[in-house]
Image (cartoon, rainbow, N blue to C red):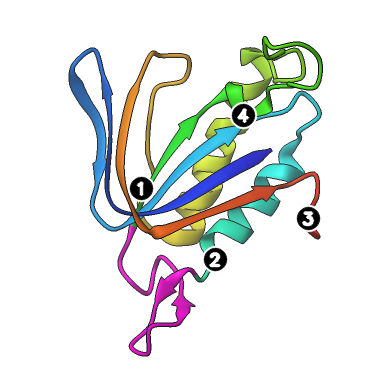
Amino acid sequence: MLAVIQRVSEAKVEIDGQINAQIQQGFLILLGIHQSDTEADCQYLANKISSLRIFSDAEGKMNLDIKAVDGRIILVSQFTLIAQTKKGNRPSFIEAARPEQAIPLYEQLIELMENKLGFPIQTGQFGADMQVSLVNDGPVTIIIDSQQPNS
């Protein structure tokens, strides 16, 4: 799984002109699910994201996690993160998980994070055409690849 975590001062997801998710301070997470991903990848990301310390403390150092700042999360599935661009100019999405595999993993990650953090995770809608807007705070953007946990 590939997670692009953006620290935001506000974010929202609209579908067909209607707001589907909206937060103030927190994370907007774009999630790509690879066909080789499993429940272990969900567990790894849930642990890592829930304890990620990228909010500033009183001294201006990135030292606080999302719970410490009473932040919230929007999680958006984005299969295009798994794009292969090595050959040609048109991306290949052949390594992205098919919906029958991706949806249960997406839902499991949401459940794991809600259990760890103690608040509901807002989401986009799997497979929908969404308009995602955000104000990236910092900007701070972190990429976590569950297949390369040491990077």
Report crowding for label 4: few under 14, some 14 to 19, many 20 or more residues within 10 A (C-alpha): some
Q: Are marks 1 and 3 in contact (CB under 8 Å)?
A: no
Q: Secondary structure at mark 1?
A: loop
Residue range highlighted in magenta: 54-71
Residue at the image position 56 percent from the left and 35 percent from the top: 31
Q: Tell me which label, 2 or 4, sits earlier in the chain.
A: 2
Q: Nearer the viewer, residue 21 or 115?
A: 21
- Compared with 56, 98 (above or below) is above
Kind of residue sitting beneath label 3: Pro
Asked whether disc 1 touches disc 2, contact meaning CB atoms under 8 Å apart, the reply is no
Q: Nearer the viewer, residue 117 or 31?
A: 31
- The residue beneath circle 2 is 52
| Residue ID at (32%, 61%) | 71
Under mark 1, the amino acid is Pro
* Separation of marks 1 and 4 at Cα, in angstroms: 24 Å
Quadrant of the rendering where the N terminus is positioned: top right
Which residue is labeled 4 in the image?
A: 81
> Which mark sits nearer the N-terminus, 1 or 2?
2
Q: Is residue 29 left or right of residue 26?
A: right
Residue lying farthest to the left in this orientation: 18
**Label 1 sits on residue:** 120
